């Protein structure tokens, strides 16, 4: 019997109606061809942010249980909403001390694992408060509690909803991280290579259970003393799901979230954004990497590696439209797919007039980036100058790694650092053959200071580095030019060439149309 992997994000696991939807979907897949179902869930919405706040509170020693108590309340509210705890049992707990007493004295036995996990979290936070410091290793342990807690509660909710044969698996037993250059990468931005389950670990942990529930975001980091906890970076549950799908050789990987799929821009800011009905792996990867936050940038790799088709679907509209990601045979055709942006980028320019025309300039410039574990994103070069953008600086621009990088680069020439800035990217296929269609985009840049312009070697994105303040306005204008709002198409005769059969095959409904559809849903 084959597996189908379902991943539910924070917004999809935080209310009773969403959990009923999860259980219905699991039952639907079980009924279809006798599949087994591997369910990956994130922490309840905002819990990872609250754990980050709890860490800061514990380090600073101020009110270190405030965020902890918020998290406790959130889980109790859900337990009440789904009917696992009565409102009377949960009432009257207004402080962290009372929550501890409540969990000791009156918690229902089926919630004992959840309660023990809360005790464990509290012990770790108390320890951090005493020492007033938290290493990347300890931070990862704290952040992992979000998913450990949600899966304890989720297991009982699923059983309560009639799914008797669910097994909870600890993801750290299955996913093992790769060696990493720094402590931050090792524990907080861990990467796990996709692989097949040669040693049968997945089969062992799943046993005969038709349904497995496990954590997204967390993995095991092999250490001399055993297996430590690491996390895959914010939003990493999508990648966990893809890794499990690859290990299991799953028939399908479904990512359930609060939107119908990948849109031509972030629908929160561009309500006329159109749903992308089908994408190939490379296109989806490029969109995720350039800022379509609905997918974690590393999640497509494992699915592609194992040839597992991916679907992105809306928990609030389970039978509605969706994005399907897989192989495609039409990559010869040019197409414009989206306008997306990323914030918090750093632009570094190294200028060395003395090196004009000398060989090896580029290798000398890039060596310090490798030595200090900082990967570059966009690149533009001239004879004596190189500009690069960085989307992730381990330890931040005030940290030791970045300081050492700048010191090394200064030995080669003058170094200028600009940040935080933003990249606005038009993502598509064969953009160099679509420059006529992209014309309006360039006109829209008049009056905006463009710090760097880059066209990707693979011809998949055209990116502009601008100030953060300019980014959202620019995205909205560029998107309106390239994807005119549907109802206004006829009013824009000059852009009518943007309608074509291939475009109609690619683009689904707009976010605003889906939002006002009779089925109705909300972000
Ligand atoms: N291009 C895009 N297409 C779809 N959603 C996007 C895009 N860019 C950003 N998003 C945002 O991604 C959100 C879903 O991702 P996320 O919050 O990580 O979900 P989850 O908690 O379910 O994992 C959506 O609510 C949407 O606002
Ligand atoms: N809980 C983690 C991992 C994650 O992927 O969450 P979500 O699926 O809600 O984006 C985070 O907030 O980063």
Image (cartoon, rainbow, N blue to C red):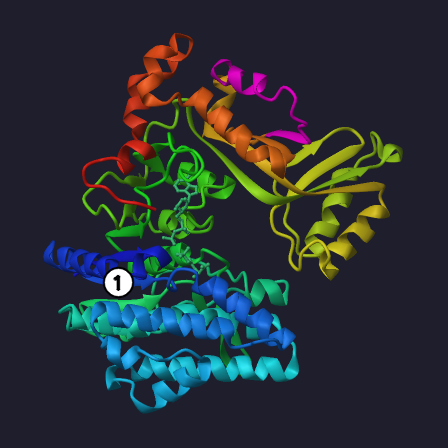
Q: Where is residue 204 drawn, in percent x and y?
A: 28, 75
364, 464: nearer the viewer: 464
> Which quadrant is the N terminus positioned in?
bottom left
List the single residue furthest toward the front: 92
Q: Does 330 sit above or below residue 316?
A: above
In the shown orientation, is residue 69 left or right of residue 514?
right
Q: What residue does disc 1 label?
A: 38
Q: Is residue 134 visible?
A: no
Find out whether residue 453 is within the magenta segment. yes
Q: Horizontally, is 263 left or right of 128 in the view?
A: left
Of 313 and 52, nearer the camera is 52
Q: Secondary structure at mark 1?
A: strand
x and y percentages locating residue 230 in the rendered image: 50, 69
Q: Based on the displayed image, in which of its 4 quarters is residue 136 positioned?
A: bottom right
Q: What's the residue at 78%, 33% (across, down)?
A: 385
Which residues make up the magenta segment?
436-454
What percent of the width, then of the height, locates residue 192? 46, 61
**Can you give x and y, in whole percent of width and height, for residue 332 in the image?**
39, 24
């Amino acid at each position: 019997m084959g597996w189908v992997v379902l991943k539910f994000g924070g917004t999809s696991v935080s209310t009773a109606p969403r959990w009923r939807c999860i259980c219905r979907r699991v039952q639907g897949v079980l009924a279809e061809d006798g599949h087994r179902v591997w369910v990956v869930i994130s922490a309840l919405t905002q819990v990872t942010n609250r754990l980050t706040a709890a860490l800061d509170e514990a380090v600073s020693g101020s009110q270190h249980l405030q965020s902890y108590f918020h998290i406790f309340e959130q889980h109790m509210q859900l337990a009440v909403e789904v009917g696992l705890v009565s409102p009377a049992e949960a009432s009257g707990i207004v402080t962290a001390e009372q929550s501890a007493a409540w969990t000791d004295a009156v918690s229902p036995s089926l919630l004992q694992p959840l309660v023990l996990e809360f005790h464990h979290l509290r012990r770790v936070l108390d320890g951090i408060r005493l020492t007033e410091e938290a290493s990347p290793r300890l931070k990862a342990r704290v952040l992992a509690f979000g998913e450990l807690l949600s899966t304890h509660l989720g297991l009982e909710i699923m059983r309560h909803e009639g799914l008797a044969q669910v097994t909870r698996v600890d993801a750290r037993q299955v996913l093992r991280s790769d060696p990493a250059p720094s402590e931050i990468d090792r524990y907080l931005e861990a990467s796990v290579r996709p692989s097949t389950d040669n040693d049968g670990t997945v089969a062992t942990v799943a046993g005969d259970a038709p349904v497995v529930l496990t954590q997204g975001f967390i993995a095991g980091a092999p250490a001399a003393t055993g297996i430590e906890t690491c996390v895959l970076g914010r939003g990493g549950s999508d990648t966990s799901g893809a890794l499990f799908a690859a290990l299991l050789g799953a028939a399908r990987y479904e990512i359930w979230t609060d939107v119908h799929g990948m849109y031509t821009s972030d629908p929160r800011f561009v309500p006329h954004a159109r749903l992308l009905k089908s994408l190939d792996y490379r296109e989806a990867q490029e969109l995720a990497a350039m800022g379509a936050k609905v997918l974690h940038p590393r999640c497509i790799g494992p699915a592609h590696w194992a040839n597992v088709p991916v679907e992105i679907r809306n928990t609030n509209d389970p039978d509605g439209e969706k994005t399907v990601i897989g192989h495609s045979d039409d990559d010869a055709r040019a197409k414009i797919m989206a306008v997306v942006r990323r914030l918090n980028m750093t632009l570094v320019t190294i200028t060395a007039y003395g090196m004009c025309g000398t060989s090896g300039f580029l290798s000398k410039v890039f060596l310090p980036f490798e030595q200090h574990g900082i990967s570059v994103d966009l690149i533009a070069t001239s004879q004596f100058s190189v500009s690069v953008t960085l989307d992730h600086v381990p330890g931040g621009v005030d940290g030791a790694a970045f300081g050492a990088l700048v010191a090394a680069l200064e030995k080669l020439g003058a170094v200028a650092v600009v940040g935080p800035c933003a990249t606005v990217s038009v993502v598509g296929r064969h953009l160099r053959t679509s420059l006529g269609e992209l014309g309006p985009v360039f006109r829209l840049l008049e009056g905006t200071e463009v710090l760097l312009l880059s066209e990707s070697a693979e011809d998949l994105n055209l990116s502009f580095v601008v100030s953060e303040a300019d980014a959202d306005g620019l995205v909205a204008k560029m998107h309106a030019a390239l994807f005119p709002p549907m109802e206004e198409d006829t009013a824009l005769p000059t852009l009518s060439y943007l309608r074509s059969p291939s475009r109609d095959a690619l683009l689904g409904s707009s976010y605003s149309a889906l939002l006002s559809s009779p089925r109705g849903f909300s972000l």
